[in-house]
Amino acid sequence: MTEEEVLTEFRASGALLEGHFKLSSGRHSAHYLQCALVLMNAERAGRLARALVQTLPRDLRNSIDKVVSPAMGGLIIGHEVGRALDKDAIFLERPNGTFELRRGFTLKEGEKVLMVEDVVTTGLSSREAITAVHDAGARVVAEAALVDRSAGEAQLGVPFYPLVSLNFPTYAEDELPPELAEKPLEKPGSRKK
């Protein structure tokens, strides 16, 4: 899929929002990608997942033992990537603020994991999820995401394969442009900070 085809999918589902948003990273933006909307259609989610899998080198695809995603955002795309790879897909949750495996999910010592996210902005959630996988004894060999919003700046400590890179500017609270600061603030993500 080309970048324009991916954006067409986001626009068609109403998932590309404009306004003033506080992202789960804590940064502010005039654009928000509500991946839950683009992924609510199973056929579309499957198409996006298959396209995402095609960004991975063949040897990497063949070496993956399990797909892991952080809930909530990565859950659907992680499941669909697992289906595209014919691998089990599990997810991490944050019941007390840090990622952990629950619901009977386990990882084996040395298991090779593909981490799958919906959107990466600063990479903080990804790094926390990768740490949780390592703490469980497995090894994250790469991360894949629908969207890289980091402008290539996210440092995850593993190879990173986004389907598309979008460079919508983001701002710290103290550097908001006046036109953005004037708009009502929305916090649409799954983490409320």
Image: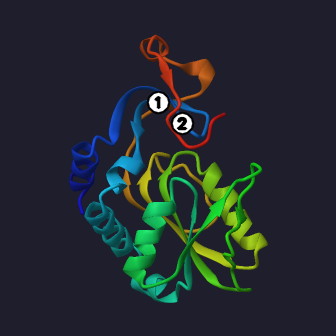
Q: Residues within 10 Å of mark 2 (few under 14, many from 20)?
A: many
Q: Mark 1 is on which residue type?
A: Ser
In the picture, measured across the screen, residue 98 lies left or right of residue 10, that is right
Q: Where residue 44 sits in the image (x, y, percent)? A: 27, 61
Picture quarter containing residue 15? top left
Which of label 1 and label 2 is nearer to you?
Answer: 2
Q: Mark 2 is on which residue type?
A: Leu
Are dots 1 and 2 in contact, CB under 8 Å? yes
The residue tagged 2 is 23
Q: Where residue 40 sits in the image (x, y, percent)? A: 35, 55
The residue tagged 1 is 29
Q: Kindly identify the residue that appears in the image at 21 percent across and 46 percent down.
A: 12
Q: Furthest residue to the front?
A: 103
Q: Secondary structure at mark 1?
A: strand
Q: Which mark, by number, is residue 117? A: none
Q: Nearer the viewer, residue 189 or 32?
A: 189
Instruction: Give whichever of discs 1 and 2 has the lower sequence position.
Output: 2
- Where, quadrant-wise, is the C terminus in this rendering? top right
In the picture, measured across the screen, residue 77 lies left or right of residue 139, that is left
* Distance between mark 1 and mark 2 Cα atoms: 7 Å
Q: Kindly identify the residue that appears in the image at 53 percent across and 84 percent down.
A: 64
- Where, quadrant-wise, is the N terminus in this rendering? bottom left
Q: Where residue 78 sits in the image (x, y, percent)? A: 48, 67
Q: Nearer the viewer, residue 92 or 140?
A: 92
Q: Where residue 144 sits in the image (x, y, percent)? A: 47, 65
- Residue 142 in view (yes/no): yes
Q: Kindly identify the residue that appears in the image at 41 percent across and 37 percent down.
A: 32
Q: Quick check: 75 above or below 68? A: above
Q: Secondary structure at mark 2?
A: loop
